[in-house]
């Protein structure tokens, strides 16, 4: 790995954070009232019970495919639109099935699913090829560390949606939220892939708040690279408040709403592409 101040970002070691996020989920769900389970969430048409059902479904699905090698269907192609349609269909089916369960049964199953999911990721070589590529980063082959970080972002942001819906304290703490943001930022080179720029163009992305940080996107004349630092001053500096940053990357806020809350210093049009970044499938 390049250790220079302007070298590429290193791997995210997400396993510990993933286990803590799962523990918080298992602490939260048994405290929800019957009314809480029926409350609307930021996910269109999904109430709390449907979001929890989705978390259960995707955990069991991953265990079946990655741990057990059990694959029953695949997308028609690797094209982004086919993958998105395929995943949307699986998600809808899973929520329809697990959303019929009582909260007590769902929680009991979630304890098993969460434990086994964490054990699965704990046992994988982080630097070996993953079963799933992180498609929203434009990768056709990813390493296990990136897939684990992607899993963390999924489990984190859906739990955060539940917490918002039932007015419980969030999980926006540096130990849990910063690695989520760090993973989301890996989508930026793919987001900017078709943006024309001069060599040396530098987009600085800041997330304000105690869980935030600074990331640097630079065009080297051939491609956009996400780096730890850049010697040139930024062409544009984009500052996103931490309370909306996760919503920007998960389609949880309208672009016009986000733009009103984000600050830009420099080439605003160049910086606006940050708000088009999506770090989820579907």
Image: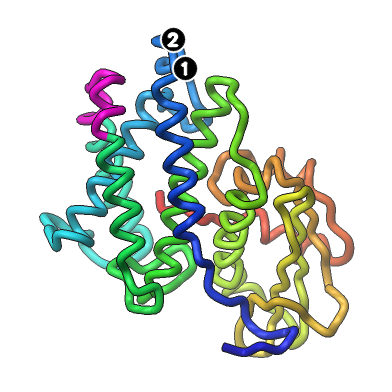
Residue occupied by mark 1: 39
Residue ID at (72%, 72%): 216
User: Image height check: is 27 above or below 71?
Assistant: above
* Residue 158 numbered tag: none
Mark 1 crowd level (few <14, some 14–19, many ≥20, 10 Å Cα):
some
User: What percent of the width, then of the height, locates residue 228?
Assistant: 70, 76
Percent coordinates x, y for residue 198 in the rendering? 75, 85
Q: Which residue is mark 2?
A: 35
Q: Do residues under tags 2 and 1 come within 8 Å of each other at their CB atoms?
A: yes
Which residue appears at 58% of the width and 77% of the height?
10
Q: CA distance from mark 2 to mark 1?
A: 7 Å
Taking the image as shown, residue 104 lies to the left or right of residue 174, namely left
Give residue 115's position: percent from left, percent from top: 31, 46
Write the residue at 14% across / 63% down. Answer: 69
- Label 2 packing within 10 angstroms: few (<14), some (14-19), many (20+): few
Quarter-of-image position of residue 197: bottom right
Q: Residue at x 37, y 70 (%)?
A: 144
On the image, the x and y values in percent for residue 160 come to 54, 36
Residue 100 is a magenta residue: yes
Q: Which residues are magenta?
A: 96-109
Taking depth in this image into account, of 223 and 229 the one nearest to the observer is 229
């Amino acid at each position: 790995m390049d250790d220079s101040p302007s070298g590429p970002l290193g791997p995210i070691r997400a396993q510990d954070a993933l286990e803590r996020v799962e523990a918080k989920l298992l602490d939260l769900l048994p405290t929800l009232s019957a009314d809480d389970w029926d409350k609307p969430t930021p996910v269109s048409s999904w109430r709390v019970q449907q979001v929890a059902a989705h978390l259960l479904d995707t955990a069991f699905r991953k265990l079946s495919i990655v741990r057990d090698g059990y694959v029953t269907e695949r997308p028609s192609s690797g094209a982004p639109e086919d993958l998105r349609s395929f995943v949307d269909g699986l998600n809808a089916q899973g929520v329809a099935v697990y959303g019929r369960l009582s909260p007590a049964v769902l929680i009991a199953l979630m304890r098993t699913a969460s434990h086994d999911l964490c054990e699965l990721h704990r046992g994988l070589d982080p630097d070996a090829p993953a079963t799933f590529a992180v498609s929203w980063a434009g990768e056709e082959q990813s390493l296990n560390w990136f897939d684990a970080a992607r899993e963390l972002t999924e489990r984190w942001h859906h739990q955060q949606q539940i917490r918002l819906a039932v007015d419980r304290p969030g999980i926006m703490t540096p130990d849990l939220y910063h690695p989520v943001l760090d993973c989301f930022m890996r989508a930026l080179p793919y987001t900017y892939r078709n943006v024309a720029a001069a060599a040396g163009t530098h987009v600085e992305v800041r997330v304000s708040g105690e869980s935030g940080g600074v990331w640097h996107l630079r065009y080297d004349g051939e491609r956009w690279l996400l780096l730890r630092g850049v010697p040139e001053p930024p062409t544009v500096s984009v500052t996103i408040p931490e309370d909306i940053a996760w919503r920007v990357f998960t389609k949880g806020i309208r672009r016009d709403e986000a733009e009103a809350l984000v600050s830009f210093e420099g080439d605003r049009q160049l910086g606006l592409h940050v708000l088009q970044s999506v770090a989820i499938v579907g």
